[in-house]
Image (tube, rainbow, N blue to C red):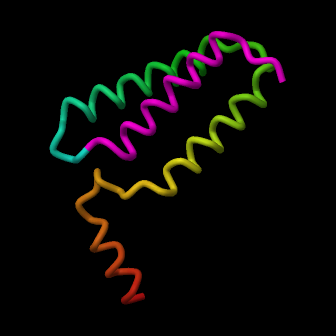
Amino acid sequence: MKIKLQDGILGLVLLTATVLLGFFVEQNEFYKVISSYSVFFIAYVIICFHKKNISSISFYILLSILLRFILIFAFPNLSNDIYRFIWDGRLL
């Protein structure tokens, strides 16, 4: 699998924004949250609208799996209702 420089940079931006949002941002830090989401969204838009060739699809599939795997170990800091969801699950 040959990775282009633009794909590598976009992948690194997505990984950095995901790690920042998942591990280093609290709910009350609005500017960090909005800037991280904005950077992630801009990188996502670039990937969606400027990648017309299908040659790097395997790279982006592996990247998406890695992004989800990273967030398995993150505590959901951006949600107030996490303890209510746990309580609802135990009631059910």
Q: Nearer the viewer, residue 50 or 23?
A: 23
Q: Which residue is drawn at 69% across and 30% down?
A: 60
> In the rendered view, does 37 fall on the left or right side of 44?
left
The range drawn in magenta is 1-25
Q: In this view, does 49 lie above or below 81?
A: above
> In the rendered view, does 30 fall on the left or right side of 35?
left
Q: Quadrant of residue 31?
A: top left
Q: Nearer the viewer, residue 6 or 50?
A: 6
Q: Residue at x 44, y 27 (%)?
A: 40
Q: Where is residue 78 in the image (x, y as percent from the top left)?
A: 28, 51
Q: Position of residue 65 (x, y in %)?
A: 65, 44
- Which quarter of the rendering shows the C terminus? bottom left
- Which quarter of the rendering shows the N terminus? top right
Q: How many labels does the image show?
A: 0
Q: In this view, does 59 lie above or below 77?
A: above
> In the rendered view, does 64 fall on the left or right side of 14?
right
Q: Is residue 20 above or below residue 54?
A: below
Considering the whole magenta stretch, tell me its main secondary structure.
helix
Q: Residue at x 56, y 19 (%)?
A: 10
Q: Where is residue 36 in the image (x, y as percent from the top left)?
A: 34, 29
Q: Nearer the viewer, residue 49 or 41?
A: 41
Q: Does the magenta stretch include residue 77?
A: no
